[in-house]
Amino acid sequence: MRHACLGGGARLRPLLCHAVSQAGGGTDEDARAPANAIEFLHCASLVHDDLPCFDDAAERRGQPSVHAAYGESLAVLTGDALIVGAFQTLTNKSVKPAHLPALLRRISDAVSANRGIIGGQAWECEPNVVLTRYHRAKTGALFEAAARCGAIVSGQFEDHWADFGALIGEAYQVADDLHDALEARGMGKPAGQDRAHGRPNAVLTLGLPNALERLEQLLDAAFDAVPECQDPRPINSWLAAVAARLQPTNVQLPSEDPLCAEATLPDAIGEDLHAPR
């Protein structure tokens, strides 16, 4: 569990929870438990995603993946333990009893089979995938939960932050697809996995030019979706850092490369950018 959680990573989701809480006048202590729970669930998803039955990835965050380091059986148990541990953190006395039902609802929704990580992982097993629905479930749902939880613990109206969290999460997944398809170095994990396993990928579905356009659209929409709040500085700082991190650099492919083929953007995505979430 320590290997899975403490071996690197940008901590974007828990930092988002803290930033939204601070934007509403909350404290780090207010956001600590839900932020930790969200990071535990994210790490659990990575442990399971790397397993031989899914990506069979030998590396994660620049070190051996859990199953590569400790074996498949312990990797399965590690992921399971992190899922349970996430909800155990919410029993911390720092969590106000009045906030607990809403936190449980939002965090459990984000990993559910209906619209969360489990649903997103299941989409990878299907031959035909609606790209936006897949991205929103696999990645957007946990970012949305992080934003909602930060709002809950700071007394803000959580629905005001839902679109922002979902959009930045979807942008993160498109950027991850770009890095994977372009086999970018420095990812801390194997590249080219989506093409090798026949998995949904924005570049493979849309073509490189449209995938880049899609990323820009999502980032612009996320900036526009930041709601009015008591102190916008923490969330603006977080968002600026994430936007810079997500921008691919030195994207150049020969024009005959199939990744350069363009698709019709709305049709290929399958859903409108501003469709209800």
Image (spheres, rainbow, N blue to C red):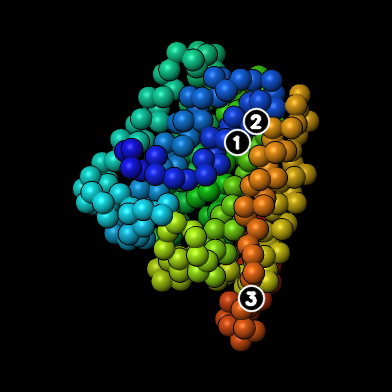
Label count reads 3
Work out whether 178 lies above or below 23: below
Q: Write down the residue under mark 1.
A: 16
Q: Write down the residue under mark 3.
A: 252
Q: Are marks 1 and 2 in contact (CB under 8 Å)?
A: yes
What residue sits 63% from the left and 62% below the top? Answer: 248
Amino acid type, label 3: Gln
- Give the spatial CA distance, label 1 vs label 2: 6 Å
Label whose residue precedes the other's in the sequence (1 or 3): 1
What residue sits 58% from the left and 76% below the top? Answer: 259
Label whose residue precedes the other's in the sequence (3 or 2): 2
Amino acid type, label 1: Leu
Q: Are marks 3 and 2 in contact (CB under 8 Å)?
A: no
Q: Position of residue 265 (x, y in %)?
A: 69, 67
Taking the image as drawn, is residue 116 in sight?
A: yes
Q: Which dot, 1 or 3, sits closer to the camera?
A: 3
Q: Secondary structure at mark 3?
A: loop
Q: Which dot, 3 or 2, sits closer to the camera?
A: 3
Q: Which mark is residue 110?
A: none
Relative to 108, 73 lies left or right = left
Q: Write down the residue under mark 2.
A: 20
- Give the spatial CA distance, label 3 vs label 2: 36 Å
What residue sits 36% from the left and 30% below the top? Answer: 85
Q: Secondary structure at mark 1?
A: helix
Q: Secondary structure at mark 2?
A: helix
